Structures are given as C-alpha cells and as structure tokens.
Amino acid sequence: MSKTSISFYGAAGEVTGSRHLLQTENGSLLLDCGMFQGHRSDAQKKNREFSFPPASVDAVLLSHAHIDHCGLLPSLYRDGCDGPLYATRGTAEITGIMLADSARLQVGDAQFFNKIHAAEKLTIEPLYDEEDAKRALAHLRPVDYDSAFEPLPGVTARFLNAGHVMGSAISQLDIRDGEKSLRLVYTGDLGRQEGLLMETPSVPAGVDYLVVESTYGGRTHEKLADAAEKLAEVIKRAIRNNGKVVIPSFALERTQEIVFILDRLFRDGLAPEIPVYVDSPMAVSLTEIFHKRRDDFSFDDKFLAYAKMDGDPFGFDYIHYVRAKEESQALNNRKGPMLIISASGMCEGGRVLHHLRNNIGDSENIVLLVGYQAQGTLGRRLQEGQKKVKIFGLEHEVAASIETMHVFSSHADNGDLVAFVKAVNPARGVFLVHGEPEARAALTAALTAEGIKNVRSPAMGETFDLD
C-alpha cells in the first residue's frame, strides 16, 4: 500500500491561496503557502485557519513569490512550522520584499479600516506583522535551477524554469515509497509560450503525476503584438479627456511588463508623452531587481536584445517611481492626464484602493485591469460592471470607464496548457488546480480529447494516494 499522498488545501476550484500538502513515509512537504484573495469574510476564514497543523510541516517548497503562493508563510511559521523553506535564488530575493510589504499593508489597511469605521465600532486585525515575515524569511534556503536537493529523507527535488515570473519554478520531486519510486511534478503558475520577459517553461520528463495550474482553461490570450497598440490608444484617450488612467497591477512581473511596453512606445514615438507614476514601494523595489538582473539567463532573448540596445528598459529616466506616502497622496490632488500603476492587481489592498476611491467616480478616468480577477475580489466586481462597489467598507459610485486587457497575462492559456501536458505526458494522472470550475472543466475536456487520461479536479481538502 502506498505511503505517499497529496492533499489540496487551497486553489482547488478557485485561483488563489495555493496550498498542497505532500505526505510521505518520512514526513510532510508543503507545496506553496498562498493567501486567499476574495470576499473579506471568506478571506478571513481561509487565511486565519490552516486545515493542517503548521507544526506538522517538515519543509516547504515555494514555486514563486506572488502573494497567492507565498502570502501565508508568515502565519505558517508563526503558528509552529520550523522546517526549511526552499526557493530559487530569484524567488528568495523577491519573497523578502513581497512579505515585508504584505505585512506593512496588512497593518496599514487594518488601521485605515478601523479609523474610518470607528463610529460603528467595526475593527479588523492584520493577519501578521513584519516580525512574523522576518521569522518566515529566516528559514529560506535558496537553490539554483536544476540543482538536486533533499527537502525530506527519500525525496529528491529539482527546480525547473516555469517561465511565469522572475525566479518562478516547476518543482520536480522524485519520491521513494517503500520499494517503489515515483516522480511528481508541480508547475506552480506556468508561463506562456509567447512571453514578454521570461523564457518559455521547461518540460520535465518521466513524470508519473502532474499537478498543473488551470487559470485560463478554455480561454485563449490576445496576441502580445496587440498590447502596445491598445495601450497607446488608452493613453491617447486619457490625454483627450484630461483624465487619469489607474492600472491595478501585480507588483511582480505585470508592472515590469507594462513599463517595458511603455518604454518601447515612448522610445519609438508611438504614443504621446504622459506622466507615468509607478506608485507601489514593492513594485519600485522589484523593478530595481529586474533592472539589476536584466542580463539574467531566465529572461527571453528578445527582451535581452532590447535591454542591451536601450540600456534602460524600465524607464528610470522619465517614469516616476513613487515610494513616499506623501507623494502618493499628492497624486489624488493632481489633475490629469496621467497614468498610475499601483498594486494590488486584484484591487484587494495597498495604494491602488486609495487611487480607486478618489478617481472611480469621475467619468473622465479609466480603470484598466491587466490581470486575472478572481471571484469575490473588487477587481472582479469592477470587471463585471457593478455600478456601486465598496472600498474600505464604504460604497462608491462607479462612473469611470472600466476596461480589461488580457494580453498581459503571464499565465499559460488553454493552448499552452494542453501543449505542455501533452509534452510531459504524465503516466499516472493529472491534477488540475489554480482554476475556477468552468476553467477546469474546459481544460479537462481539451486534455481528454487529446488522449490524456486520469485528469482530476480535486475538491478543497481532498486527499489522493499516489500509487
């Protein structure tokens, strides 16, 4: 009988909160420890209670530094986990910035919410603080791509390039189970075959079980070649209307992609000049890392060639990178036209909430959504066309134009996912995670049509023996 199993405690039937627990005869290994993002009540429950004792986790493998994959690490280590935390060197460097910023946002957003609801005696508590983040980061063990390491006795692991964001990794695990052995691969988030910045994903071989994301199952991305033209048109409209363009953007990768396209637009004279503000201390720090490591091997060859020719692909000479709170607040009193790029990408926290509450009621303004908006998030409600939304618990009329550009997604689309799974050709089964029910159903149908067998969509909390 097999002594190896995998349980799915997050991103099972939804897109955020990735947490997958691998049990072997020698211990337990957690694949990602992400924060759930959605309705406040759901988020509070899912983010404050673990479905397993944190102290029972012997080691953690982190696929990449997006908050929906790493955001609950401070809680995990505060609540009893004491095992090593393995990540690629790029992810380790970025995670330090992400978790420190997340902790500050947790505290800051709670303070602001409590302040404006003082008369109602409504209060919320931050999930964790900076000391909790530091405790988690002390357990980091950086590992090079393609280097073997042993997170548990009897488990040999390697990180392969996932092509999603800087440092993102596919986790390849060779597990000894009694007299047998098996290879399990967890993709984390998988990059596109056509990307702006990153190399295409590596394809592991000899795989028994594949745990693969399914965010864009059933959907096809717009072509990247259209991105510059569409962004230029938004800029031209903002200038005509003297309006503001607010772009809620993931601080990691999406912000750098947008800035890179803006750099090319302005350099080639394809869009008129407009003040651009990157208003997120975390995004500023991460962009500096991208700039510093722009010769990194994980970047796409086309980007490397442009960076060498341009010298400054992230526009530090003319784009305003905002760190100070006072400068951020001053943007609310400044007239357009201007473009503000601010985190978070699903409008669930951070400075973008202040920009939205100050600008969403003006019909001259544009809110441009450039990433996946999970169910229950403010970004999803805006995307669905709701005319009244709550920000910090207060209702706001939506008069600004709400638009979406899927072209920027750094996730594999349906065609990319099917091609990847076919190339891997897992011998014993596929588990679809990190996707809403419709996406998983569509991807299951597409894979089945291609002859892929044993495609499963785990329910939250479901456990599977790996025979």
Image: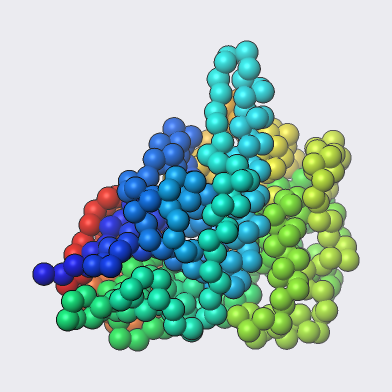
* Image quadrant where one finds the C terminus: bottom left
Q: Is residue 419 visible?
A: no
Identify the coloring.
rainbow
Please tell me which residue is depicted at 84% across the width and 39% down the height of the picture. Answer: 326
Please tell me which residue is depicted at 61% across the width and 32% down the height of the picture. Answer: 110
* Image quadrant where one finds the N terminus: bottom left
The quadrant holding residue 431 is: bottom left
Question: Foreground: 369 or 285?
Answer: 285
- On screen, residue 174 versus residue 59, left or right, reads left
Please tell me which residue is depicted at 67% across the width and 67% down the height of the picture. Answer: 257
Question: Foreground: 282 or 264?
Answer: 282
Q: Is residue 100 visible?
A: yes
- On screen, residue 95 versus residue 179, left or right, reads right
Please tell me which residue is depicted at 32% across the width and 79% down the height of the picture. Answer: 174
The quadrant holding residue 333 is: top right
- Residue 80 x, y percent position in the rendering: 43, 48
Q: How many circles with numbers are drawn on the protein?
A: 0
- On screen, residue 225 versus residue 341, left or right, reads left
Question: Foreground: 69 or 144?
Answer: 144
In the figure, 264 relative to 394: above or below? below
- Residue 223 x, y percent position in the rendering: 56, 72
